[in-house]
Image (cartoon, grey):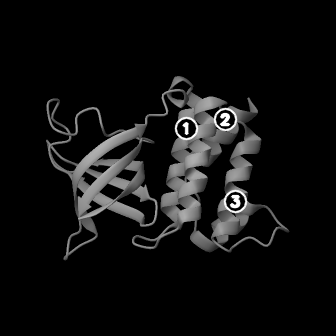
C-alpha cells in the first residue's frame, strides 16, 4: 500500500462504474489509479473525486502495469473558488495537462507538485491572468531543465516535450480579451 497527497489531473471513464484517475502525487510523481465504483452515486468515492482536488490518497501498486488500485481518498482542498470562473477552470486544466505532458510516470518531481499546488491555490483565491500563466511555464521549464532564460519558456517546453496542450491558446485568448 502506498499513500501520499495528490492533485487530480485527469479523469477517464473506464467502465460504467469505474474511472481512471491520473494524479500528481507528492513524492511519487504521476500516478494512475483505477477508482472502482467511482461513477456510482452512492459509492465510497462519491463526492471525493473531481478535477483539481487535492487529496490524501492510498493505493495498491500493480505488479503488471502502471494502473494501480485506488483504496482511499480524503479530499483536503476542493478549489471551489476557481470553479466560479471559466477562465480559471481553463487555466487549471492547462496547468494540469502541461504537468502530465512533461512528467514521466513513476518519477518523483516534488518541485512540480508544489508548483501545481501553488498555481491552483492562486487561481482559487485571486483568479487567472497572463502573467500567472507565463510564470507557471517559466518555473516548469526551469524545473525540467529545458529553459536557459534567454528565449520564451513555452518554446523551450515545446522543443523538449513536443506540442503543448491546445488549451494554452484558448487561455491566452480569454486572458487577452
* Residue sitting at the far top: 84
Q: How far apart are marks 1 and 3 (CA)?
A: 19 Å
Query: Where is residue 79 drawn, in percent x and y?
Result: 49, 33
**Of 36 and 163, which appears nearest the observer?**
36
Q: Distance between the residues labelled 2 and 3?
A: 16 Å
Q: Distance between the residues labelled 2 and 1?
A: 9 Å
In the rendered view, tell whether residue 80 sits above or below residue 18: above
Earlier along the polypeptide chain: callout 1 or callout 3?
1
Q: Residue at x 31, y 42 (%)?
A: 74
Question: Does residue 13 appear in the picture of this structure?
Answer: no
Could you say which disc has been placed on residue 139 in the image? Answer: 3
Query: Where is residue 169 drawn, in percent x and y?
Result: 64, 45
Residue that label 2 marks = 128
Mark 1 secondary-structure assignment: helix
Mark 3 secondary-structure assignment: helix
Number of other residues with Cα within 10 Å of mark 2, as a class: few under 14, some 14 to 19, many 20 or more: many
Q: Which corner quadrant holds the N terminus?
A: bottom left
Residue that label 1 marks = 90
Name the front one of labels 2 and 1. Answer: 2
Q: Which residue is drawn at 28% across and 32% down?
A: 47
Q: Which corner quadrant holds the C terminus?
A: top right
Earlier along the polypeptide chain: callout 2 or callout 3?
2
Q: Are marks 2 and 1 in contact (CB under 8 Å)?
A: yes
Question: Does residue 133 appear in the picture of this structure?
Answer: yes
Amino acid at each position: 500500500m502506498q499513500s501520499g497527497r495528490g492533485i487530480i489531473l485527469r479523469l477517464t471513464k473506464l467502465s460504467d462504474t469505474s474511472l481512471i484517475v491520473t494524479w500528481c502525487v507528492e513524492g511519487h510523481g504521476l500516478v494512475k489509479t483505477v477508482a472502482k465504483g467511482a461513477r456510482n452515486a452512492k459509492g465510497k468515492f462519491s463526492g471525493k473525486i473531481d478535477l483539481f482536488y487535492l487529496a490524501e490518497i492510498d493505493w495498491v501498486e500493480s505488479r503488471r502495469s502502471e494502473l494501480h488500485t485506488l483504496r482511499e481518498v480524503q479530499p483536503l482542498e476542493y478549489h471551489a473558488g476557481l470553479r466560479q470562473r471559466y477562465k480559471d477552470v481553463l487555466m487549471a486544466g492547462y496547468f494540469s495537462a502541461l504537468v502530465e505532458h512533461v512528467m514521466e510516470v513513476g518519477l518523483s518531481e516534488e518541485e512540480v507538485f508544489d508548483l501545481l499546488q501553488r498555481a491552483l491555490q492562486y487561481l482559487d483565491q485571486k483568479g487567472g491572468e497572463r502573467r500567472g500563466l507565463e510564470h507557471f511555464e517559466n518555473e516548469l521549464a526551469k524545473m525540467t531543465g529545458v529553459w536557459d532564460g534567454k528565449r520564451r519558456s513555452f518554446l523551450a517546453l515545446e522543443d523538449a516535450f513536443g506540442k503543448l496542450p491546445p488549451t494554452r491558446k484558448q487561455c491566452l485568448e480569454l486572458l487577452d480579451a
